[in-house]
Amino acid sequence: MPVKIKIEKKEKHTRARLGKLTTPHGEVETPIFMPVGTQATVKTMTPEEVKETGGRLVLSNTYHLYLRPGHDLVKEAGGLHKFMNWDGPILTDSGGFQVFSLGPLRTITEEGVEFRSHIDGSKHFFTPEKVMEIEQALGADIAMAFDECAPYPCEKEYAVAALERTTRWAERCKRVHKREDQALFGIIQGGVFPDLRERSAKELLAMDFPGYGIGGLSVGEPKELMYEVLDQLMPIMPEDKPRYLMGVGSPDCLIEGVVRGVDMFDCVLPTRIARNGTVFTHNGKLTVRNAEYARDFRPMDQQCDCYACRNYSRAYIRHLIKTDEILGIRLTTIHNLHFIQHLMQNIRQAIREDRLLEYREDFLKVFNAG
Ligand SMILES: Nc1nc2c(CCNCC3CCCC3)c3[nH]c(NCCc4ccccc4)nc3cc2c(=O)[nH]1
């Protein structure tokens, strides 16, 4: 069994669980936030810095690595762990979301998806079989099945067609997935329709994957609607399998997801807004590049003990960002990753002490007040 979750504790008042996820590259605590390293790097960070911020499992992407540098090259390098010098667990997304996000640049058929590269416009064809070949060559510990993520909003008929294709493609992925040291996760679709979510879950649960992605969310729907879908879906999910809410998220969504029984999260948000000069603080977001911080010699977040907040002022980091000095976005990235990992650590502690709802209230009262 390459990947399994052991539930250490269930929080008394919610569906939250404290767990240990065992993988061929080590064991990680859940609930876990997984930093995104789309092109085999968490942008601007060395692996040591990712670890220093609290990162333990990183994501990468089939779509991007297939286009550049090519999965055959990564395989020749000894696989993704060796290529990017990351000795912890890695998860690769299947590219389902990426090729569907390409909009008019793609054509969907039962066989697969024809798409044009966002780099040079060249034509490519992803089938479940092709994606499994790529993910097995990359060698991540967890590989996501090739799925179809329905947009929001969409007609119920569209959501039905996408979930049915996702189920058929999951079968095709499972049939050709041979790597024993890699876990294949199915991805649940069904849009925002409770009956379709239940149907997609049941069809995929019947295939007995070692873990499940919850896809088709964080695609523009109101947060309350995402929470409602989770409230309806989680009760039918098996307790002994990891639940991975894909593409989430912001501090409030992470807490709300854990409350509803989610174990794993990924999102580009913390690293992406950092590169735009915006950081999370206990009092909400702060755009350090704004003029108001030009002579502000305090740290970005006075309650933070990350490397950036211990050694540099808002004024200095603003100066770096305004002058396009690379150190600037490195410092905001270090801070945002540390902030999110520290939040996850506090959430895990709150589960241990059965006070997650109090923690949610305390954190959001201050975070949203900012
Ligand atoms: N296979 C698959 N992937 C999905 C993803 C990608 C998850 N991150 C992959 C990483 C691997 C490398 C790249 C990312 C999603 N991301 C989001 N929302 C992100 C929303 C967002 C976008 C930008 C900023 C903040 C939030 N919803 C998602 C749904 C699905 C889905 O159904 N199927």
Image (spheres, rainbow, N blue to C red):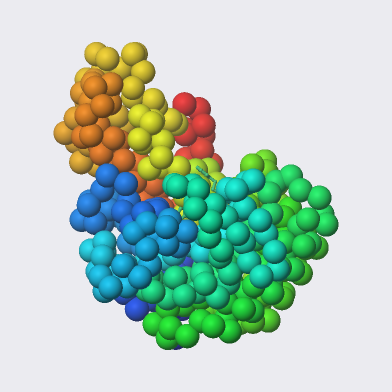
In the displayed structure, 11 sits above or below 311; it is below
The mark tally for this picture is 0
Answer yes or no: is residue 338 visible.
no
Instruction: Please provide percent x and percent y for residue 367.
Output: 47, 34
The image quadrant of residue 339 is top left
Along the line of sight, which residue is nearer the eye, 278 or 299? Answer: 278
Answer yes or no: is residue 161 visible.
yes
Along the line of sight, which residue is nearer the eye, 46 or 74? Answer: 74
In the displayed structure, 5 sits above or below 235; it is below
The residue positioned 26% from the left and 61% from the top of the image is 84
The image quadrant of residue 243 is bottom right
The residue positioned 53% from the left and 43% from the top of the image is 252
The image quadrant of residue 329 is top left
Instruction: Please provide percent x and percent y for residue 292.
Output: 34, 13
The residue positioned 39% from the left and 47% from the top of the image is 340
Q: Residue furthest front?
A: 122
Q: Is residue 120 left or right of residue 204?
A: left
Quarter of the figure that contains the N terminus: bottom left
In the displayed structure, 111 sits above or below 40; it is below
Along the line of sight, which residue is nearer the eye, 150 or 202? Answer: 150
